[in-house]
Image (cartoon, grey):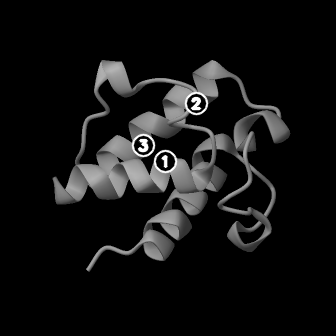
Amino acid sequence: MITMESVEQEIKEIAIEVLGMEITADQIVATEEGFLEKYGFNSVDALELLLHVERNYDIEVADEDLNANLLKSIRSLASYVINQKTA
């Protein structure tokens, strides 16, 4: 069963791997807003993260859903994934 906690953990791990972060998943606060900006990532990095999340969860982020709220935090992205998987 897919849970918010498991999806958040997986997205943290994807972010660390894809973005080359030198921290652990436990150091990332899922509810912290401005996650990408905090670690110095740009829009290209954000798209790379989204591509990996799409592949990992076999979903497609609709163009109309690509906005600042989607990547506001790890939790907002995890919530989107859960909504897509349970729709």
Left or right of residue 47: residue 29: right
* 4 and 43: which is toward the camera: 4
> In the picture, residue 33 is in which quadrant?
top right
Gap in angstroms between the C-alphas marked 3 and 2: 10 Å
* 16 and 79: which is toward the camera: 79
Residue 46, disc: 2
- From the image, which quarter does the N terminus lie in? bottom left
Instruction: Tell me which residue sits at (32%, 58%) in the image.
Output: 82
Gap in angstroms between the C-alphas marked 1 and 2: 11 Å
Q: Is residue 37 above or below residue 33?
A: above
- Counting residues from the start of the chain, the first of labels 3 and 1 encountered is 3
Q: Could you tell me if the residues under marks 3 and 1 are in contact, i.e. CB atoms within 8 Å?
A: no
Q: Amino acid at mark 1?
A: Leu
Left or right of residue 25: residue 61: left
Gap in angstroms between the C-alphas marked 3 and 1: 12 Å
Q: Amino acid at mark 3?
A: His
Q: Position of residue 52 (x, y in %)?
A: 42, 43
Q: Amino acid at mark 2?
A: Ala
Q: Position of residue 20 (x, y in %)?
A: 70, 46
Instruction: Tell me which residue sits at (41%, 46%) in the image.
Output: 53
Left or right of residue 43: residue 54: left
Between disc 1 and disc 2, the foreground one is 1
Residue that badge 1 annotates: 77
- Counting residues from the start of the chain, the first of labels 1 and 2 encountered is 2
